[in-house]
Image (tube, helix red, strand yellow):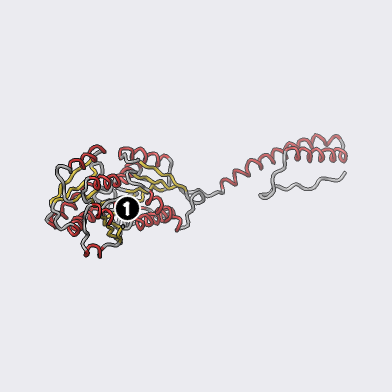
Amino acid sequence: MKAPGKFRVSGVHPLPSAFAVNGWLAALSATAGVALGGRNRRAIHIRRREFIFTLGGVAVAWPLAARAQQPKVPTIGALVIGNISPEEFWREFRQGLRDLGYIEGQNIRFEFRSAEGQIDRLPGLAAELVRLKVDVIVTWFTPTALAAKQATHEIPIVMAETGDPVGTGLVASLPQPGGNVTGIAAVTAELAGKSIQLIRDMLPSARRVTALANATDPFSKPFLEQIQLGGEATGTAINPIRISNNEEFESAFTAMERDRPDAIIVQPSLPSKRAAELALQHRVPAVSVPRWFVDEGGLMSYSAIYADLFHKAAMYVDKILKGAQPADLPVEQPTRFQLVINMKTAKALGITVPAKLLARADELIE
């Protein structure tokens, strides 16, 4: 009888079935039994059991070794308030990572969490991301960064855009943030103050401006402070209204029927789309800092270019994934800004935009 061929186990050949192995061993036993006689059959059977045991060990260890060799895919947690559409943030942030070579599902994963406009949900959502052991948490707006920092002192936190991170205690300083938080410090408060001058440039007769502030957002303090400074510089009376919930938000506009301001300025963490709708409904010129406010029907905005900030946040994440420590990454501030005017809204409100202001605008929405 012809001896069976050699059997090989390698990373590119499948393991034989149990039927094939048993057949091979049976043939081996029969051949050996004829050649050596019955007295050696017991030894053959012992070797057969040893061989099967060894082969079984290979079959188990092989997939385990293959899994052990697969690199860990980093997971990025994202936390937003959700009262403003996070679409631009999410689109531009992920595009920034794609530009750096990250492909979702291959070398990076995401866990996105939104409080859907309810700030009191942020601590629980931040704690959930910590339990998932994400590698980095990216936040948008001050309340999300504060919730993330309260949830963890170990996981790196990247601020995609946060107002006054030093004043709110998120970082020790911009050049040396310390701790586990770094990223982008917005200059929204300062821009809100400058917006008072823009209101006067558009409406020279304006003397009374109502500032709608989000009472649940710690950033409301510097926001209102800068607006008050802008009012003092231009001789404009500022009426601050702090809003804690949706009912107060709606009633603030209803009150404008009785005591109409010349214009209003809206804090970015308030529901901007609803603010633009109500302002147009009550025929009150409304201004805010972020560009999306004008896209949603607001009259004017003066802001940083948010796509720049979200791409920069992706660069911070890349550095941290490659070993950098947040404490050693200086907090940056925006360097490019844009003035946008919604001409359709101006027409609806009966406002003629001065030529000088039109010339300064970076974009006009017709």
Q: Amino acid at mark 1?
A: Asp
Along the line of sight, which residue is nearer the eye, 16 or 241? 241
The mark total stands at: 1
Please tell me in which quadrant of the rendered image residue 302 appears: bottom left
Q: Which residue is mark 1?
A: 295
Left or right of residue 26: residue 299: left
Task: Give percent across and percent down for residue 22.
Answer: 76, 37
- What residue appears at the point 24 percent right and 56 percent down from the top-left corner? 191
Along the line of sight, which residue is nearer the eye, 191 or 247? 247
Disc 1 is placed on an element classified as helix
Say if 47 sits above or below 235 in the image. above
Left or right of residue 5: residue 139: left
Direction left: furthest residue? 235
Task: Give percent across and percent down for residue 275.
Answer: 26, 46
Task: Give percent across and percent down for residue 102.
Answer: 47, 54
Along the line of sight, which residue is nearer the eye, 119 or 66? 119
Quick check: can you spot residue 342?
no
Please identify the quadrant where the C terminus is shown: bottom left
Please identify the quadrant where the N terminus is shown: top right
Left or right of residue 252: residue 318: right
Please tell me in which quadrant of the rendered image residue 183 appears: bottom left
- What residue appears at the point 30 percent right and 38 percent down from the top-left corner? 120
Task: Give percent across and percent down for residue 139.
Answer: 35, 48
Along the line of sight, which residue is nearer the eye, 203 or 183? 203
Quick check: can you spot residue 357?
yes
Mark 1 crowd level (few <14, some 14–19, many ≥20, 10 Å Cα): some
